Amino acid sequence: MSALFAAALFGLSAAATGATPPAPKPVLMVLTSHGTKGSTGQPTGFYLGEVTHPLAVFDAAGIAVEFASIQGGEPPVDGIELDDATNARYWNDAGFRAAIRNTARLDTVDSGKYAAVFYAGGHGAVWDFPDSPAVQRVTREVYESGNVIAAVCHGPAALVNVKLSDGSYLVAGKRVSAFTDDEERAVKLESVVPFLLASTLSQRGAQHQAGPNWTAQVSVDGRLVTGQNPQSATATAEAVRDLLRKSTAAN
């Protein structure tokens, strides 16, 4: 089973569900392939709840989801908290596990296939998202095609170096939410991560919108949707869903 086909199994069709019209194209969910927190050697990866909770929103809306990661194959995972019912439901699902084991390599992805790209978080993202040529290409192409870019928690690390065709930073002048410097200090990783995400986005010209630590905070600026932390994962996906529904209705 191919990576993209396995992942697409999780998108329920509108015909099967009778749902409000889904996006005509799937969402590409991108995961980090980086598995250690800097020199500490402590494990990290993508944060499970920042994948499962958005996936639950997209599945319920009949929006297909496909998976990619920076290196392809099976990315490292963090936050396997199975007392969370949504985590447990997907983690115990053989189809989901197969999709995660077989993610597409991002640099092989055709960006034209997707209505949105969703960058999941997890601390690993701050190491391999920012300087990835594939992240920069896919993000720019999807955004400039009139489609949606989304990211949650450390996922907005994907945005710090993305420039549009005119040379401007994608985030410049836009409202953005991401894991805050204060939250990074609260988990005592401010000296471990290669940069503080919120400060760096601000340096790129973003208007960083911070909520209280560990509370849901989502910013929507046109076709850019960003969430602050794991608590924001569901609402970030809901905002993407709503944009895709509006786009489908308009067409």
Image: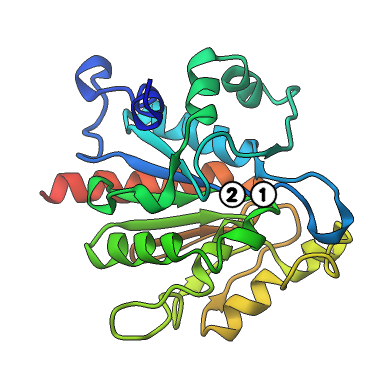
Q: Are marks 1 and 2 in contact (CB under 8 Å)?
A: yes
Distance, label 1 to label 2, CA atoms, is 8 Å
Q: In the figure, residue 40 lies in which quadrant?
A: bottom right
Three-letter amino acid code at the position of disc 1: Gly
Does 128 appear above or below 29?
below
Does 13 appear above or below 112?
above
How busy is the neighbourhood of tag 2: few (under 14 within 10 Å), some, or many (20 plus)? Answer: many
The image's mark for residue 77 is none
Left or right of residue 81: residue 249: left
In front: mark 1 or mark 2?
Answer: 2
User: x and y percent of residue 5 in the render?
Assistant: 33, 26
Please give the name of the residue rendered at 71% of the width and 47% of the height, measured from the top-left corner: 35
Please give the name of the residue rendered at 56% of the width and 32% of the height, measured from the top-left corner: 52
Between 250 and 152, the one lying in front of the other is: 152
Between 16 and 42, the one lying in front of the other is: 42
Residue labelled with disc 2? 32
The image's mark for residue 122 is 1
User: x and y percent of residue 136 in the render?
Assistant: 42, 66
Please give the name of the residue rendered at 24% of the width and 31% of the height, measured from the top-left corner: 20
Does 171 appear above or below 145?
below
Left or right of residue 210: residue 167: left
User: x and y percent of residue 125 in the render?
Assistant: 62, 56
Three-letter amino acid code at the position of disc 2: Thr
Which of the image's four quarters has the N terminus? top left
User: x and y percent of residue 209 in the render?
Assistant: 59, 71
